Image (cartoon, coloured by chain):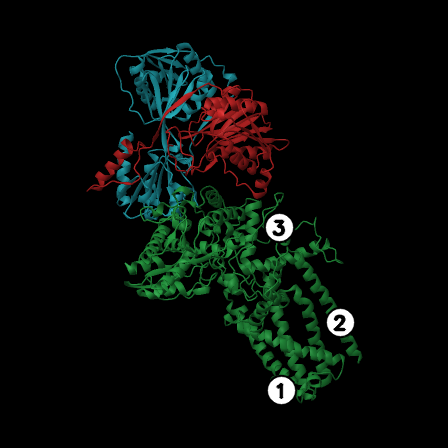
Amino acid sequence: MGKDVLVFGEIRNGELKKVVKELIAAAAVITGETGGAVDAVLVGAGAEKEASGISGYGLRKIAVVDDDAVADYSSEGYAAVLASLVGEEGYGYVLMGATSMGRDLGPRAAARVDGVMFSDCVEVRIDGGALVARRPVYSGKLFVELTPEGDGPVFISIRPNNIAPAGESGGSSEIAAKPSGVDRAAIRAIVSEIIPLAGGRPDVTEADVIVSGGRAMKEESNFRMLEKLADLFGGAVGASRAAVDAGYAEQPIQVGQTGKVVNPKLYIACGISGAIQHLAGMRTSKVIVAINKDASAPIFEKAHYGIVGDLFEVVPILTEELEKMLQ
Amino acid sequence: MKIIVLLKRVPDTEAKILINQDGNGIREDGVKFIINTYDEYGIEEGLRLKEKVGGDSKVTAVCAGPEESTEVIRTALAMGVDDAVHICDPALAKPSPFTIAEVLAKAISEEGFDIIFCGKQGIDDDMAQTQSILAEKLDIPQVNNATVFELADDLSKAVLNRRIEGGDEKVEASLPVIISCEKGLNDPRYASLPGIMKAKKKEIRVKNLADLGFNEAPSSGRSRVLKWLPMPKGGECKMVEAEETVDAVKELARLLREEAKVV
Amino acid sequence: MTVQGIVLLVLFVAVLVVFGFIVRMLIRTLKLGKPEDRSGNIGQRINSVLVYVAAQARVLSQPAGLGHFLIFWGFIFITLGTIEHIVGMIVPGVSYTAVFGPVVAGVISWFQDILAFLVLLAIIVSLFRRFVLKPVRLKIDDPGARQEALFILTLISALVLLMFGIKGAGILMGKVDPAYAPVSSFVAGLLQGRGLDLHMFENVLAWTHHLIVFFFLLYVPYSKHIHILGAIPNIYLRNLGPAGTLSRMDFEDESAEKFGNSEIRDFTWKQLLDLYACTECGRCQAACPAYLTEKPLSPFNMIHRMRAHLMDERGKLLKGQDGEKGETGAEGVEGTPIIPETMTTDEIWACTTCGACMQECPPFIEHVQKIVDLRRYLVMTESNFPQEMQAVFRNMEVNYNPWSIGFSTRADWAEGMDVPIASEKKEFDVLFWTGCAGSFDARGQSVMKAVVELFGKADVDFAILGVEEMCCGETARRMGNEYLAQTLIDGNIDVLKKYSFKKIVTACPHCFNTFKVEYPQFGFEAEVMHHSEFLLDLLEEGRLKAGKIESTRGTYHDSCYLGRYNDILDQPRSILNQVSGVEITEMGRSGKRSFCCGAGGGRMWMEEDIGRRINEERVSETTKLGVDTIFAACPYCITMFEDGLKAGEIENVRVRDIAEVLLESID
């Protein structure tokens, strides 16, 4: 197995994903032990432009692959590019973000080069010469630490926002354009269009972040405040049954036993007391934040973080603080 | 049209997942097992496709898993799946996605297929790999995380939406194809009682590795679990307090970023 | 015998023969239904007829029932007179005076006169009610039903007036003794001296009267007055068992393609007899929480339309029948589905199974079973039900509770409370059944904790099943998922049989009813007590002594499955009365006539998006009393009240379980 690491520089909408710098940092953890080099590959429209953005981040070289066949993402085309690079350069590790692209591409590329893959990792390290990847299982109820067996290259997808991104380390990387070698006609699944979310917000059942309001929202227009907070994350706005009954919100966003059952990474309950009807719809959320005036509200029994206070005061400050963080 | 739906037996989402005494897996006592929830979208989509295409279309469920998987296979049959192949072999205990994909590829090839539906990931190991590896082994296109599925009238290609960050990719894929299903694709049906009764008589073909022509479990893509770790999380709600609301909220924001890592 | 006598005889016999054929057809129609055993208990059944037919006990439970009482008895006497007159016309000289003597005949005549007069008054009041006052209970969408009611009332009035004319003329001709006919005497006075040919006059009136009677006889079976034929047998055959028991389905036949009822033949003959028995009094709808909150369901309308449906269907269905042998061989004839033409799914799902309709119904029609039978078909055969129910079923299948909370956490509420678990204790006096709401809902849990604390104070030897407990099956059963319900019931029985205990105590009326009256269908019998009964026993035995709480003015809400279905009315009130500081004001609708909170029949887990909210309706009834506390003895009721109070933004009213109050008074 090789000791060099290849970072897949994911490009979406012509821009390099933020996670790529985090991958570079993770790669450095590996090469810090193995002594290998870290390379990157950028594929698709915008690759060349974006490559310069990570030159000097400790990368030895950056391959830029941008021709007609790979201008848009396809699992087949991109897997072919990765496979040929791994074949040519003998990479031991390929890192990518655990994004919709990384999760789609990684296993296919790994299978093509007879490698192995660990998805959705939150930590990678070298332990006694062997790679150890930590990843959550059972919807985050446990972690496992895995190590590869066999000689194949190891593909690892890493969850965004888990590792501090690499900073500029001076110097520059060798940027080289490379043909994809892919025959466009041979690609059987083609992306024809990217459809942004209707109204800019995902459905509550599909959102990673949900900001929900209860009867304490007092009126419909106050939900704008929750939308503002949700929009920071590209999240959705939800409502308790009481809020829907009171006419503050529409039924399709009702969360609970008789509404939608949701399972986001972050659920912010604003002015929701937490009756079982509501809890039944959101209690499996990974992180629950409760904002309520009443310290004895049952929502606090299920929440991970709670603030006793007036939501009309708390929510705007929280929005402001998080906005600063996300910038 | 030959439709394959893949299923996996997994612990219920509500199950208490605890590490077993040997520290090499989870405790299965007191854990209720169900069909992987995302696979249900696949079953539903397969059944709808069969209803739409009609003719001699057939939906076959393929499940690799322990003997106890029969129960979830019967559930799929009760929903309306025509028959099932159950790949069951002691050598397949705790398999990697690569092993399973190779075995599934063999079984599915034997069955013949035009379209394969499965869940976007198993809610047990959450790997989300098997379908893409399977696509590679079968040399067919893949579409992951489908939220919309339509088949062209001439049955030659599928038009799908696939969920990505902040929107959907519209994808056109030629058949045969494997599609992994995301929540929102459909609302899986509730098996009717006549369906449940009929399911008891439907055929489940049990195959072991030898039946599929393997001498031993395929060894590609092997890995080893070194350690199982509990999620470090206190059960209690952390009440964020400060004299000034502003400070409490600032602290909350910090915790969300640094401790909960959700920002 | 006169020519006129012969003509009348022939006509009379012909009418009787045709009527006989109609009755035979009605009976053959009943036989289209499935078998059901309503035999036995003859003494009790005869007693029912005496109380509910002769004495009209249920009819008279409302003031307007007096009209029916009068019409009922008036008509019995009028009919006696009609028979006498017809026979007298056929065989001149035959009369009650001739057969029974003047006194008996006189008494009959006197009653006839007085009652017939009262009938007239009753009809005037009825018309006034129906067309001027228009009470809720007489509202019906079908204009035909109103026209029919008017037509029948007109016919009855005509018959009564004609009778007075005949008797009046009879007095003048010396055929009727005026001493026993006060009203007719008055009529005779009006007729006197008008130069009428009395004989001809009487004859014309008599023929008109008798022809109307004949017409009536043949018309009745096709009108709502079929209840004259149907109600008495229906009361005789009424359900003598607990009203809160649904029929048990058999799932042995694995080749069955259909479960539950979709067409009229799927109902039992007794359920079809119910359709004959309806008087269209509408008392059911006036008590129905769904109807009164503007939902499409009306039990009145349901029976009305099902009867019309039966009448439409029977010709087709009876055609396939072998008339000679009277066998129901209508196989191969497609029955028309009841849904959606006759009943809509919105109606079927609107029912809370509260049983108020059955409680009110004078001829003892059983509405709830019919609705559940229709639900069974929708759920089990068609998988056609409101989308939110699927999660409930799935949760019950996987985690044995409606909320999808892991079953392994079922006993978590008891953590740190030293609550004995059956699997460790094995033998104990009381099995405390916590139920799903008690196990998982924070509000329900606090009631369970109060009960457990009271048990501790009274030194009760008890245990809970803990994680071995599953949903009792009540909700699934009432939602029409009998298969799931039986899975849960069988599972629970297997667990219960492992332990030795004397009685089951539960704080949930739904669990209570199910264990008490439904588990015996599945071979499990035990003494089952609601916590109000058990706690009262503890108080009476002196094992608990109620104390004092801060002065509170409250009202007690009777849970349907506790009060109406199981007659537990006094026990919770007695407990509250023993707590000093508690003052109870009763609501207008209380006791067996309590108004549902809206949660029964699986409604707890369904959206209520048609009409007004039942719980809010009930809350407004309590707030009118100006109380500060609503006392309840059911976790569903408590939830519905609390939600209703929140919706009405009423902050100064609390909802408390009797156990919580009792505990507070002791602490």
Q: Are marks 2 and 1 on the same chain?
A: yes
Residue at mark 3 to residue at mark 2: CA–CA distance: 39 Å
Task: Decide: is A225 above or below A62.
Answer: below
Instruction: Say which of C104 and C307 sits in front.
Output: C104
Whether label 3 touches label 1, CB < 8 Å: no
Q: Secondary structure at mark 3?
A: loop
What chain is tagged by disc 2? C
Instruction: Say which of A163 and B148 sits in front.
Output: A163
Task: Write down the colour of chain A.
Answer: cyan
Task: Decide: is C153 above or below A235.
Answer: below
> Which amino acid, mark 3?
Pro
Determine which quarter of the picture holds residue A256: top left
Residue at mark 3 to residue at mark 1: CA–CA distance: 56 Å
Determine which quarter of the picture holds residue C106: bottom right
Q: Which residue is mark 3?
A: C337
Task: Write down the colour of chain B.
Answer: red
What chain is tagged by disc 1? C
Q: Earlier in the sequence, mark 2 or mark 1?
A: 2
How packed is label 3: few (under 14 Cα within 10 Å), some, or many (20 or more)? some
Question: Residue B195 at what x, y percent from top left?
Answer: 58, 40
Which chain does green denote in the image?
A: C
Asked whether, in this view, residue B100 is left or right of residue C109, the answer is left
Q: Which residue is mark 2?
A: C13
Q: Which mark is residue C180?
A: 1
